[in-house]
Image: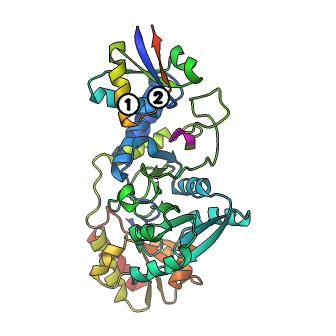
Amino acid sequence: MKKVIVFSSVTYALRAQEILKYNGIYANLTRSRAVKNVRGCGYGISFDPAYLSRAEGLLVQAGVPMLGSVDEK
Amino acid sequence: MIYFDNAATGFPKNASVAKAVSESIDTCGNPGRGGHGYSIRAAETVYECRKKLAAMFGTRPDLVVFTSGTTESLNIAVKGANRSGGVTVVSNLEHNSVMRPLNALRRRGETVVRQFRVDLRDDGATLENFRTVSRGATNVVITHASNVCGRILPVKDLRKNAPDDAIFILDAAQTAGHFGFGITDLGVDAICIPAHKGLYGPMGVGALIINPESDAYFETLIEGGTGTNSKSFDMPEQYPEHLEPGTQNVSGIAGLSAALDGFEYPAGESELFFELVKGLEQIDGITLYGAPRCKADLKFYTPALLFNKRGYDCEELAAKLNENGIAVRAGYHCSPCAHRALGSFESGGVRVSPGRNNSKREVTEFLRVIKTL
């Protein structure tokens, strides 16, 4: 199981990926069904669910707007 | 060929620029449109360039909006910031990329345009002129430096003297890449830049740089697909996609990104510019327009110099120079306001604009040819 944070644009997804990487959380850019289900087409970053809370905190702190988070197999 | 038309486009570009353009054609898909490797590669290429421009101008990557050039950036900014009943203040040195969008708004009754006179010799007088017209202004659109005579405007002080709630848009077509400046330091809401002039990137790319501390919100100029939020007929509200409908010029952006790698602001341009000024001053029959008078004035100028030679129409003179292997630009330079301000509205003029790749030897040769004509 992976956690996916969904963003409104690929720009935000790439910025989020970079911020998380800088903080030791490795995430993959994804355009999965989970992302599509949130708001039509979009991009997300998938990563180990254990990091969700920390990842969300880092992104809020950096001012990166998130549309939500979903589980993905 | 001696190339002295860098105010039109910086030339030659580094070889890495063409290489990056070519490689992107072979390796990039459509950015932000898919989850496959080609699309992701393109999105990463675009994002890398956003990061470099953001670092250069002191903003965030998501506040770098890619456009086709300064003209599109200015159209988005000028029209996107205008609200009905607006009052827009401009200088008397503006390019038509400012004046034509504004005139379109004015003809539709959507803004009133007020113009102030730039005093080429006294920034204090320029500020005084600005204050007399800027009361009640909702928007200010200012060139950072004239594309005709190179005079730099005191932007930071103009911003301080503008109404606090006025949206301040800077046309940096002639300054981006010539010297460093940050958007929050200047205090302007948006900066419009080209890739292909002082940054020596490809033509067909530019950017609208938005201040992270600004409350200004730019409405869309055109709408279309963004690859995200596709079920909605509305454009995304967030930058940059809000202002980036359609497929981006990925190859151009890749070229710009390569141009920014290891970028250094040019050190020798001012010296060459001054050599040109002093050399032309000493030639009989030459008229200079708005040029620096002494070395101390150079800090107020980017390297663009307007002149005419007695007995020649400016286009004829440029053609003669071309025959002698020297590339300059003659005419009105899309800036009738500036030519009116400089006293060359009837004649036009020859603009000579050295760049980072020019040498003192080329200046000497240029002066020799001008003397012989």
What chain does mark 1 sit on? Answer: A
Q: Classify B203 as above or below B2.
A: above
Say if labels 1 and 2 share a chain.
Answer: yes
Tell me if B11 is positioned left or right of B135 in this view.
left
Q: Residue at x 35, y 20 (%)?
A: A53
**Few, some or many C-alpha atoms within 10 Å of disc 1 (few <14, some 14-19, many ≥20)?**
some
Residue B48's quadrant in the figure? top left
Is residue B39 found left or right of B185 in the rendered image? right
Q: Magenta segment range?
A: B238-242
Give how far apart the Cα atoms at labels 1 and 2 are: 8 Å
- What's the amino acid at mark 1? Leu
Location of residue B160 (image quadrant): bottom left
Image location (x, y in percent) of residue B227: 57, 30
Residue B269 visible in the snapshot? yes
Give coordinates of residue B60: x percent, y percent.
39, 44
Snapshot quadrant of residue B245: top right
Q: Secondary structure at mark 1?
A: helix
Location of mark 1 (residue):
A59
Whether the magenta-drawn stretch holds residue B240 is answered as yes
Cβ–Cβ under 8 Å for marks 1 and 2: yes
Picture disc at residue A66 = 2
